[in-house]
Image: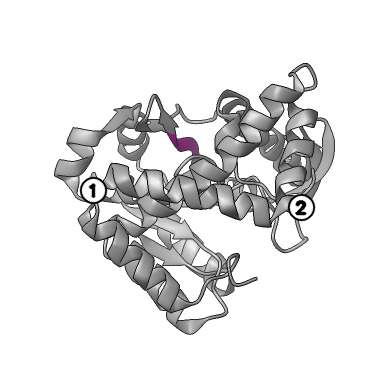
Amino acid sequence: MFLKDPPFIVYRICQEIVLHLPLEFSYKLASAISNVYRWLHKRDYFTIQKNLRIIFPDKSEREIIKYARETFRNFAMHLVDFLYFPKLNREYIKKNIKIEGAENFDSALLKKQGIIGITAHLGSWEIGGAIAALLGYPVNAIALEHSNRKVQDFFLRQREEKGIKVIFPRDVARKTLAALGRKEIVSFLNDKDYFGSGLELSFFGRKTLIPRGAAVFALKTESLIVPGFTVREAGRLKFVVEKPLSYKPSGNEKKDIKEITQRIIAIIEKYIRRYPGQWYYFDEL
């Protein structure tokens, strides 16, 4: 439990290490630690393998194990990216991060509509929000609260200092509607339902609870739905923004919410299949 939910002092020590070491060395160190973590948490390791077999029924056992090990290593590097936030700026982005499809945000914002940003627990999603904010986009992110107040404040400060406005579940209806009313971006992590209120939909062929909020707010506010992901490719981070998801309300709200949410999941499935060692889902499908 200590490793799964480290206290504030652990985050601060790790951040000091990351900020005072070359970034590539921090990645290597985190990868080495992830191997130990994987050994100590075999249940998570086997759960990931089980999910990967569902996603890739034709892959060999060697490939499944390879992807599972990559998942732990990439998640460790994702944490390094988050701890590196104090050094993240526009110049760093220009030199080190490949930007692809940002014009899709630009054209969407020109339409003077709110934007529902769709992403997943994939790649380095935290830095994705920071990249968008540092590039000048008005970013709001829905985030869970931590039970530890100091950890909560640490996470909040990390995000807000990069220009991300954080929305917590207790304020999600009011603040999301306000942000979309200001024609801003509100980012949704749409691959995991934390509250048991989602729709039971097909996710890699399995009936799974999927958050419905993105579709609900899109229909209510006539906002655009724009998927975006930050993934690690050839040793480099890539920030990808897709074209808006087209949808036309039929007047049957329940049907529309279900259909839009299933289409969102189809996009997320596409990226998970493309980057299987970068999806951090530790529950069984």
The front one of 155 and 225 is 155
Q: Residue at x 48, y 83 (%)?
A: 149
Residue 160 visible? The answer is no
Q: Position of residue 265 (x, y in %)?
A: 66, 35
Relative to 187, 55 lies left or right: right
Q: Position of residue 75 (x, y in %)?
A: 52, 47
**Quarter the C terminus occupies:** top right
Q: Residue at x 38, y 73 (%)?
A: 154
The front one of 74 and 152 is 74
Residue 208 visible? The answer is yes
Q: Position of residue 209 (x, y in %)?
A: 78, 49
Q: At label 2, which amino acid type do we have?
A: Arg
Residue annotated with mark 1? 22
Q: Secondary structure at mark 1?
A: loop
Q: Furthest residue to the left?
A: 91
Residue annotated with mark 2? 43
Which region shows up in magenta? 225-231
